[in-house]
Amino acid sequence: MIFAASRALECASRAGADEVEVYCTTDRSVSIATKLEQIEYASESLTRGIGIRAIVAGAVGFASTNDEKTIGHASELAVTSARASQPDPDWSSLPTRGAYPAVHGVFDSDIAAIELSRCVELAVAMIRGVTSTGATPTSGGLAVSTGTSHIRNTNGIEHTEEGTSISAFIECIVKDGAGISTAYDFDVSRSLDIDTFEIGRRAGELAKQSLHGGTIETKKMTVLFSPLAIADILEYAFTPSLSADNVQKGRSMLSEVGAEVGADELSITDDGLRRCGIGTAQADDEGTPSQKTMILKDGILEGHLYDAYTAGKADAETDIVSTGNAVRSGYGTTPAIGVRNLVLGYPASDVVAETTSGVLIHSVIGAHTANQYSGDFSIEARNSFLVENGAVTKPIKSLMIAGNIFDLLKKIDGAGTDVRAVGDIVVPTLRVSDVQVVG
């Protein structure tokens, strides 16, 4: 991998690039799919590839390949692409080398050495977890990955990262006479410490508890969003507004640093160094050292998320540098701004016991349709329950929530102790007042 990166850098420079960045990945993955109570398929794969970004007179070109024999051609193609593109007057430079911090909990040798047969056992345990409750599994999956990335550029960056991950999910259904209810659960970790039987058991129990749901009238009321529910809403309705690229292009509602955008005691950080975090690494995908970035403090907007390009484009008088938020979905893509580990903090308590009247929502459908600029969303709630006099009581059959994420953040008045990492968003159950509920 290191030799391939060095060769690509040399080829692109020789072809006439002013700056070159090479990003290489190797990934060994195992995928299991389940259907009903059976393993539908199990596969193991090894993926390798290299992406080359070349800059010529401020114009950016990109090419990628998964064949080491064509590295020279791909490098030249990246340069040719740059020459055919319009120069970007806002281009500054690729990032330069910095001091890389230590990170912990991102590589597990047990995952790296896991066999396909062991992955099948874990998937079967998840199915057994569902059936132990009397529910019927419908579909699910388990994925294990061990990856290595190497980034190198003409500004002196040479950096290698290793990481592992495992994720599992399952959906199930329960029928009781005319009553039908569904539910799902999942978990994700950087270590082989997830309990797949428990994932299935939780899904089955939730489906059973949701049977014979009643109705609710349309009105404004207190809503408790579980970690799964609020994480979905934040991902699609809120995080796009944190991107400096969207701010600079006038596509963000969070343009004014110092503005009040959340409840008084609400804090939000993006932590690329979080122990065992799904988005944790020593560097981002441009080679900029990772850091912890304060986004909201006591409800006040402190700043945005930057990559090297948007930091270079910012007003020179602000002394803005990349926050280490350049991320890629693979070697075949150029970097874009994304969250690393978005951590929401609010004083914790037993929010259910403290709620006189409200509704608890375990998950939502349709958050991906949210307006990324305005923050407006309209979603269907799944596995919802009435909260009465400090206790979770009756299930609710059908429920819609309509609102705006920026209004919602200002109305937070409670948070649970059940902090959970839902992918790269870390959040507890949040209680929000005066939410429009459509029965």
Image (tube, rainbow, N blue to C red):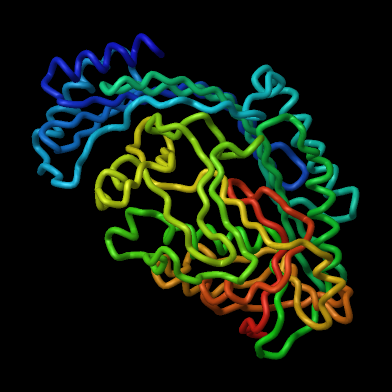
Compare residues 213 and 166 and report the one nearer the observer: 166
Which residue does the image show at 43% across and 57% down from the upper left?
242
Which residue does the image show at 53% across and 60% down from the upper left?
296
**Seen from this angle, which residue lies furthest top?**
3
**Where residue 437 sits in the image (x, y, percent)?**
64, 83
If the image is split into quadrants, where does the N terminus sit? top left
Above/below status of 51 relative to 260: above
Task: State the count of labels.
Answer: 0
Compare residues 403 and 275 and report the one nearer the observer: 275
**Where residue 417 sits in the image (x, y, percent)?**
79, 57
Question: Can residue 305 be seen?
Answer: yes
Above/below status of 303 relative to 48: below
Give left or right: position of 148 versus 145: left
Question: Can residue 178 be seen?
Answer: no
Which residue does the image show at 67% across and 63% down from the upper left?
363
Give left or right: position of 387 versus 268: right
**Where residue 173 sits in the image (x, y, percent)?**
77, 59
**Among the 4 quarters of the image, the one containing residue 226:** bottom right
**Where residue 336 sits in the image (x, y, percent)?**
36, 44
Which residue does the image show at 62% across and 76% down from the upper left?
411
